[in-house]
Image: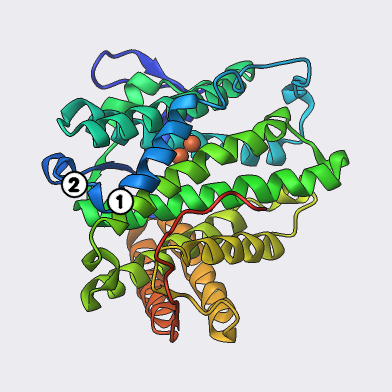
Amino acid sequence: MNARADLNTAKPVNDTTARASETTLLDPRFYTTDFDELDRIDVTPVRAEWDKLIAQMKSDPNKSHFKKTEDWDTPDWDNMDPELKKELVDFLVSSLTAEFSGCVLYKEMKRRGNNPDICELFNYMARDEARHAGFINDALREAGIAVNLGFLTKAKKYTYFRPKFIYYATYLSEKIGYARYITIYRHLEANPQYMIHPIFKWFRQWCNDEFSHGEAFALLMKTDPKLTQSFVNKLWIRFFLVAVFSVMCVRDHARPAFHDALGIDIDWYDREVLRKTSEISRQVFPIEIDLDNPRWERGLVKLRAAMGDMAEAKSRGGLGGWIGKTAAGARAGLAFAGLYLIPVKKNAVPENPRLEPAY
Ligand SMILES: [Fe+2]
Ligand SMILES: [Fe+2]
């Protein structure tokens, strides 16, 4: 195993830790925000629904879920097809980074806050994400490649987002996380011969945590109508919808061997996940992307090609590589703008946003 030096302690970190510490356009990010502004939220306008959700989180329905049982059959890492192994590890590391990113942000909010409602919520969400990240790391540990989470906390770059951008981005990543996990789970439930790793068996109850976290952000957005109804914020919501959705599609298409082994057609899977997320997001967003517009799929193909060329040019290096990367970057920007400009559909947002997981 290659090792890179840990800058702080000169201790070697393994490849998965180094991989998780990278922050490219496609990697899950770590966030920081204006915690004081977040702490000033008053949940009074959504009090009844808020208390119900918090009571549900407090009851901790998944308390004993994230433990290995006899259903956990250890995968044969040594004899796995190398391409599949690489992509499965990449999937696990990327999922771990996303889970841990939530944990870090939520824990920090809990630590810095004084608002009892906000602190209680973020405490429960940090608890859940720590379990999720820990469970994935146990799976990586079995393969001898656990991520050093302490190192990651220090080494990874943090992206600053204003609280409203945290709401849009985190709401969407929680709901898309739910949609991804439940879609994989239902597919494997119907096609158990493709169970390439036992962790997928845990996804059904797991995704309910993500669903609840998304509910919390929906309620937070409901505390202030401007957050979702003003002209400018609608443009921002549109931006986050396009960014979160398109990044997911580009990322998934980079793992053909993984999806093949799962018996999953990537285009079908992405369509399913986006349809579910889009349907759910009607609970709070006044607009949604027109996923049936042929320009959407065409734009995604262009974006994917441009991002692929960018990565290829970057690995080539030198002046030619730089020119190639710049040209492909411009094409990616244009493709993204094309996706953004597709006319959106309007939603009549319900008074009470609360939903239960239904897939
Ligand atoms: Fe999670
Ligand atoms: Fe979550």
| Quarter assignment of residue 119 | top left
- Camera-side residue of 133 and 321: 133
Q: Residues within 10 Å of mark 2 (few under 14, many from 20)?
A: some
Q: Which mark is residue 352?
A: none
Q: Earlier in the sequence, mark 1 or mark 2?
A: 2
The residue under the point 36% across, 72% down is: 238
Q: Is residue 21 visible?
A: no
In the rendered view, does 321 fall on the left or right side of 84? left
Q: Secondary structure at mark 1?
A: helix
Which amino acid type is shown beneath numbered disc 1?
Leu
Is the residue indicated by label 1 positioned so its CB lies within 8 Å of ligand 2? no
In the rendered view, does 205 fall on the left or right side of 299? right
Q: Secondary structure at mark 2?
A: loop
The residue under the point 43% across, 27% down is: 58
The quadrant the N terminus occupies is: top right
Which amino acid type is shown beneath numbered disc 2?
Ile
Q: Which residue is mark 1?
A: 220
In the rendered view, does 304 fall on the left or right side of 343? right
Q: Residues within 10 Å of mark 1 (few under 14, many from 20)?
A: many
Q: Is residue 86 visible?
A: yes
Q: Is residue 293 above or below residue 319?
A: below
- Camera-side residue of 113 and 302: 113
Q: Is residue 152 above or below residue 192?
A: above
The residue under the point 43% across, 35% down is: 20
- Camera-side residue of 325 and 236: 236
Q: Is residue 51 above or below residue 151?
A: below
Q: Which residue is mark 2?
A: 41
Q: Is residue 331 above or below residue 308?
A: below
| The residue positioned farthest toward the front in the image shown | 48
Q: Name the spot of residue 88 as percent of width and height, x first.
A: 64, 38
| Quarter assignment of residue 81 | top right
Q: Name the spot of residue 37 as percent of width and height, x first.
A: 13, 46
